[in-house]
Amino acid sequence: MFFVDFLGWIMKICYDVVGNYGMAIILFTLVSKVILLPISIWVQKNSIKMVKMQPEINRLKINYFGDKDTIAEEESKIYKKYKYNPFASLIPLIAQIVILLGVVEIVKNPSFYIGVENLDFNFLGFDLRWITVEDGGLSILIPVIAGLSALVMCIGQNIMNVLQAEQSKWNQWGMLILSVGLSVYLGTFVTAGVALYWTASNLLAILQQWLLNIFINPKKYVDYEALDSSRKALQELQDLNKATKRTKEQIKKEKADYKRFFSIVNKKLVFYSESSGFYKYYKGIIEYILKNTNITIHYITSDFNDQVFEIAKTEKRLKPYYIEEKKLITLMMKMDADVVVMTMPDIDNFHIKRSYVRKDIEYIFISHGIGSNNLTMRKGSTDHYDSVLATDKYQYEEYKKTDEVYHLKPRKIIKCGYPLLDDMITDYKKSKQKSDKRKTIMVAPSWQKDNIIDLCLGEILQSLKGKDYDIIVRPHPQHVRHMKEFFEKMKEDYAGTNITIQTDFSNTDSIFNSDILITDWSGIAHEYCFTTEKPLIFIDTPMKIMNPEYKKIEIEPYEIWVRKIVGEVVKVEDAKNIDKTVDKMLKNYKKYQKAIVKLRNDAVYNLGDSATVGAEYIINCVQNKIKERKKK
């Protein structure tokens, strides 16, 4: 066979150079690496291409998460764009196997190929004709050495090989086990000469990879920062639903509801809720639509225990569906409805996308708070909605200015108002107000870094302890969850004083019965003062900024300037004297109330009637879609 003769000729030259059979095999291995160097260089470049385009592939998998057909189609386009051949990595392996078969043939009859009749087969105490499975004894070390060489090679490749280093731990371990197993197998059933070739090949592969990384350095071509961030983002998606253990009942219900949702055609109106707590933002709007139209509302929730399931028992045209976030990705991609209403920001920015099935869906965003979305949500969080319902005139101006500064396609910005505030004011007026004249001060920190609890809670309580009013500390639920022992200790420390630590959140009466609320950047502040017309004290802790570019639109966020209108701002270092601010505020109580009422009535749209305005707009959108469909 010509190829074997060619390899035998190279082996003869190697023997003539070194004069030793074992050293000839090692030199032959080195020469074979040199001959295959062009292929190795090509594979190195191909591997770099693969890792270079991996961030793009990861983003593709994020964008089309769950849509395997589209991912496969788009992935092939990326391969063509980069001129990447996914089968390139097989070429060195095939070449190695072909050469190995040739070496096996040569070692069977080395005297013939090398041209030496009395060839010395001794090498470092081993007879290169030994076969472990037949000869035993010292030859048992041959498969061990071969296996160790494979182990060292795999560890080196996992560190140095640009593609192998990016493989998952399971893939890396799988390749290691396969390589070591194959090497041990070869070392056991072939002659020691062949095992020596294989061992030398493994060790020289490490040297070759090191040299390739010097001359074709992957770091010059690969954006490792983009690779890392895209990998983490993809992993977060893949881990959805894993954090919380779901029961068989939940999984079964999700499958049934998913199937049921897509079995219904001509869906006109869909609401999505992240959890049961978000129903309150839709409540007034949904009730108006159900009462005044014949529209069926399809309500998707990611909360298995959402209150909407109980409400739907008496509302035949309210159809709830339980879909967890991972399954929600696919559902939203395949959404087929006229109008979709959400409080979730960042649609089309991350894993939750606008529909790929229907491009004409009207997506409507309902804000779940008064104030600056530009500060408290990420940049571009509502850019991909067709309509946004503004709660107040400052939010409205922010939306308009954002469209102008970022040259966005103009959205429909509706002067709606805040239905939740209307409900809270109604409920507050109906609620039982405390009968005693003793004042109550509530401390309600936010859940963010460097909040009141982190920076000055002790100083505040020390200042207010023993005063002629009651103090209630109502931490954020997450504080209680993560600092349970801390608050239990506080209950003991302040027992018998005018200070109560409240860790039961089943009742909100204490919030609205308080005469002054002390907070930092908590979102409850504006709902509290506009509902009760009572003032606040803001501790000037570091501000939570979700959008680093918030100053770009040149409108000062509502949360910053409103503090001095609805209350007082106290520096962290002055918290130890907060009793003086409380006393001042109680003496000038009506002044603050008057300012709060004036701001609320001036700023918030359609006070007392916002649910009707929001519902009428949504109904109009549905009707327009029906008219458009009839025209077609």
Image: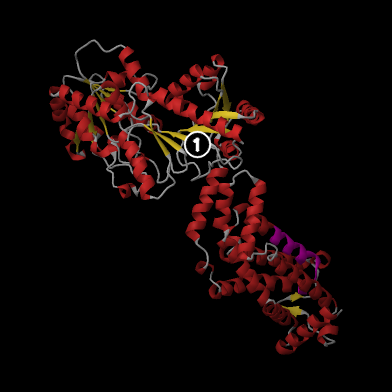
The C terminus - image quarter:
top right
Q: Which residue is mark 1?
A: 363
Vertical comparison of 144 with 57: above or below: below
Please indicate whether residue 431 sits to the left or right of residue 141 in the image: left
Q: Amino acid at mark 1?
A: Tyr
Residue depicted at 57% across the width and 58% down the height: 54
Please indicate whether residue 3 sits to the left or right of residue 246 in the image: right
Q: Is residue 587 magenta?
A: no
Residue depicted at 81% across the width and 65% down the height: 189
- Under circle 1, the secondary element is strand
Residue depicted at 60% across the width and 73% down the height: 207
- Percent of width and height locating residue 168: 60, 54
The answer to whether residue 304 of the structure is visible from this angle is: yes
Q: How is the image coloured?
A: secondary structure
Q: Main secondary structure of the magenta part?
A: helix
Vertical comparison of 358 with 107: above or below: above
The N terminus - image quarter:
bottom right
- Percent of width and height locating residue 573: 18, 40
Identify which residue, 380 or 251, lies in the foreground. Answer: 380
Q: Is residue 191 magenta?
A: yes
Residue 579: quadrant of the picture = top left
Q: Residue furthest bottom?
A: 16
Residue 173: quadrant of the picture = bottom right
The answer to whether residue 275 of the structure is visible from this angle is: no
- The segment highlighted magenta reads 178-193
Count of marks placed on residues: 1
Please indicate whether residue 51 sits to the left or right of residue 505 in the image: right
- Percent of width and height locating residue 226: 49, 57
